[in-house]
Image (spheres, grey):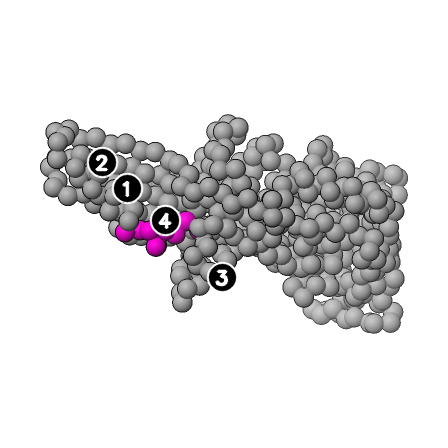
């Protein structure tokens, strides 16, 4: 018996056109061997079947390190941190179970202070936001920050939530239109106007890293990931008995805030993060009319689901090897809280910045697909034929920082405590907008 598992990092790995040829040569080779062996033998190996396409040379892809160098040079040349984007916000009044917006008395002109945002983000992890007299305050938990963050990230998040067509921010890696290219590359899409920004680059790189770790190989180099001690991949959770002949499986991994719990108080106009800012989800996909469609089925017994539990549990540990995994969590905190703040009556009506003075830097458009194959060959003289099972997995997914779980709560003590601390110079609270 020959069991051959195909896992494709990012999208593809469907060898439909070559399937008969592959099976033919495997069957002939193993059948001839079994005619002369009187023992049972089994061999297993994992390997990369294809050479990754170099999209960096075509300027359609870029490493995070190289992208950061370009971005930092641009923002320094444009003096980005010296800017204070102007915003027009509306703060509604609570009337029973409704929020009443007065476009005249409730409308305010404010500024987003990049220098203050830089200061508070370098203090630790965001845990809450509140409004007092039209001013916006951010509260953090103390933590040593040893990863990249930029104050203009918050401008991008606000713009994405309140001003973009999507009213949220997202990124995804999807199959190209031509199915013949699925085992070659994936197309990167961005939503909420995050393309060519640091926010968009973090979302892409965190997504790419997650999928590489799931397979155990880097999709750009094709090399096995060996530096992460204790790393488990999907291969560690596969059960050969679960396979069916000719089975092809599609599933997706993605980061989401849909399970993030945020407490909110409409009266006090405060929001507080209660739990983890980010979770990782997976589900099976089905091919319908040559298109991948969601099944809304997480399949809790699948290897993909079990791997997401490993990844979620060890996210902080994995972040020590890949700091971008810290960065995506931190961006998720700001996104979740500003999304929830809308429920207190806070609305950004207009947000302005000079396009020419923003350090837009091209983010990846394509990323290579690698076909990671696990092949197990069994030989037994009691059988006069060989069965070949091929299990193929296609990965899609991305980052969706949109809805959260809201819990209406009394946050008056939280707000009063931190407002008083701000007045005496506490470093863990800052007024970022006034």
| Residue 28 image position (x, y, % from top left) | 20, 42
Give whichever of discs 3 and 4 has the lower sequence position.
3
The residues colored magenta run 12-20
Q: CA distance from mark 1 to mark 4?
A: 11 Å
| Residue 406 image position (x, y, % from top left) | 63, 57
Give whichever of discs 2 and 3 has the lower sequence position.
3
**Disc 1 and disc 4 in contact, CB within 8 angstroms:** no
Image quarter where the N terminus lies is top left
Task: For mark 3, give the secondary structure.
Answer: loop
Mark sitting on residue 378: 2
Which is closer to the viewer, label 3 or label 1? Answer: 3
Is 16 magenta? The answer is yes
**Disc 2 and disc 1 in contact, CB within 8 angstroms:** yes
Picture quarter containing residue 188? bottom right
Residue named by callout 1? 3
Nearest the eye: 61 or 314: 61
């Amino acid at each position: 018996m020959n069991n051959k598992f195909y896992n494709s990092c990012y999208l593809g790995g469907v060898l439909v056109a070559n399937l008969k040829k592959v099976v033919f040569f495997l069957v002939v080779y193993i059948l001839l061997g079994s005619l002369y062996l009187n023992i049972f033998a089994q061999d297993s190996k994992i390997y990369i079947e294809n050479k990754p396409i170099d999209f960096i040379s075509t300027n359609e892809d870029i490493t995070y390190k190289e992208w950061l160098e370009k971005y930092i040079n641009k923002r320094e040349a444009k003096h980005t941190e010296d800017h204070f984007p102007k915003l027009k916000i509306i703060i509604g009044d609570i009337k029973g179970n409704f929020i009443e917006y007065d476009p005249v008395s409730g409308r305010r002109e404010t500024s987003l202070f990049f220098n203050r945002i830089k200061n508070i983000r370098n203090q630790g992890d965001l845990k809450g936001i509140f409004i007092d007299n039209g001013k916006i305050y951010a509260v953090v938990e103390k933590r040593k920050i040893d990863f990249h963050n930029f104050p203009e990230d918050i401008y991008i998040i606000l713009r994405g939530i309140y001003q973009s067509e999507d009213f949220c921010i997202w990124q995804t890696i999807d199959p190209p239109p031509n199915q013949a290219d699925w085992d070659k590359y994936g197309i990167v899409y961005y939503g909420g106007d995050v393309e060519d920004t640091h926010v968009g680059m973090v979302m892409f790189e965190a997504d790419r890293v997650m999928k590489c770790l799931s397979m155990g190989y880097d999709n750009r180099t094709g090399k096995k990931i060996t530096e992460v001690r204790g790393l488990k991949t999907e291969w560690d959770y596969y059960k050969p008995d679960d396979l069916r002949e000719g089975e092809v499986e599609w599933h997706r991994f993605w980061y989401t805030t849909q399970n993030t719990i945020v407490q909110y108080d409409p009266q006090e106009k405060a929001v507080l993060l209660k739990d983890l800012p980010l979770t990782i989800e997976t589900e099976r996909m089905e091919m319908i009319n040559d298109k991948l469609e969601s099944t809304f089925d997480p399949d809790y017994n699948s290897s993909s689901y079990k791997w997401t539990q490993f990844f979620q549990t060890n996210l902080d540990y994995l972040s020590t090897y890949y700091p971008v995994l810290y960065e995506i969590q931190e961006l998720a905190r700001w996104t979740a809280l500003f999304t929830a703040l809308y429920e207190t009556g806070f609305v950004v009506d207009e947000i302005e910045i000079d396009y020419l003075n923003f350090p837009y830097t091209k983010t990846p458009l394509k990323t290579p697909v690698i076909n990671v194959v696990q092949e197990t060959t069994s030989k037994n003289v009691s059988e006069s034929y060989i069965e070949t099972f091929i299990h193929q997995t296609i990965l899609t997914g991305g980052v969706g920082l949109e809805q959260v779980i809201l819990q209406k709560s009394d946050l008056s003590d939280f707000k009063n405590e931190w407002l008083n601390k701000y007045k005496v110079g506490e470093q863990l609270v800052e007024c970022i907008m006034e």
